[in-house]
Image (cartoon, helix red, strand yellow):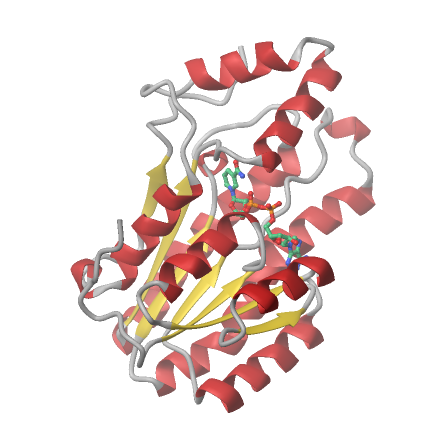
Amino acid sequence: MNYSLPGLSKHIRVVISGGADGIGRTIAETFLAQQVQTAIFDISESAVAEYRKRYPHSMAAVVDVADARQVEAFFRQVANKLDGIDILINNVGIAGPTAAVEDISPADWERTLAVNLNGMFYCLRNAVPLLKAAGGGAVINIASSAAFFGYPLRSPYAASKWAAIGLTKTLAMELGPFNIRVNAICPGSVNGPRIQRVIEKEASVRKVMPENVRDIYLRQVSLRTFVDAEDVANTILFLCSDLGKNISGQALGVDGHTETLSNG
Ligand code: NAD
């Protein structure tokens, strides 16, 4: 269903990292349905080409979020084309390795933190001056229910998502006086190909069947369900609209209430 939300209109400009596929694309589509001007970037050339075909009026570029220079160049382009921004959605995040900590290579550890944490910082340092110039706005950092619990075999991912909450709380304080709200969304397992890959990897490391891992993941959630990308996108829309105008510094689970990630 397509609701029309106060404060979101064709005058509003949003940037979404990793917006060409997965949850990011659903977020982009949800904003586009509100007539919001939407600019995305993504590391995948094929996904960006496909996105451009579907949404020729939405700005789209191939950028690796872990490359500070590429991110800076992208935001320069956005500032020129859209004359600023009002909303930043820090969506990119990779799953990283599934392994015991002693089996994780420094390269895998560093890449996970570079994409999930440094990438968030690179977007923020370029977006914040534009948000301040616009007189205020909203930032959403996509974390995970892994930001609330220990997550065995996924240490770099969990560490990066806990860091995203630290960044969210800190920047809500720094930027609140500039009328910029900063919140984190913490999705649980989201229906789609990525969670299937996560489950298969974990099953192979634990030497069990993927169905066993899926069953454990479901039993860890009070509502016994995975969520949809649309649940995440609609919550973001609410927070970025005037309905969420006094909400900042929060880490909000969209996860059917995850009770633990202990995998037991
Ligand atoms: P995904 O793996 O489907 O990737 C989404 C997009 O990000 C893809 O188009 C991909 O090409 C792009 N991307 C990957 N690395 C990039 C980089 N270095 N630079 C720019 N773009 C890059 O991910 P998703 O499942 O859509 O997850 C989106 C966010 O939600 C992530 O932060 C993830 O950690 C979080 N999350 C996902 C789940 C889930 O079950 N899928 C659960 C909790 C949290």
Residue in front for this viewpoint, 223 or 205 = 223
Residue at position x 71%, y 25% in the image? 201
Answer above or below: position of 33 versus 129: above
Residue extending farthest to the front is: 53
Please indicate whether residue 116 sits to the left or right of residue 168 in the image: right
Near-viewer residue (78 or 28): 28
Near-viewer residue (86 or 21): 21
Q: Quadrant of residue 114?
A: bottom right
Could you tell me which residue is drawn at 50 percent across and 34 percent down?
A: 146
| Residue at the (34%, 54%) spot, across then down | 236
How many numbered marks are there?
Answer: 0
State the image coordinates of residue 175 (x, y, percent, origin top left): 34, 71
Find residue 223 and report its horizontal and vertical position in percent: 32, 21
Q: Is residue 65 visible?
A: no
Tell me: 243 left or right of 182.
left
Q: Position of residue 187 (x, y in %)?
A: 43, 39
Rendered residue at 24%/63% (across/down): 241
Q: Is residue 249 left or right of residue 14?
A: left
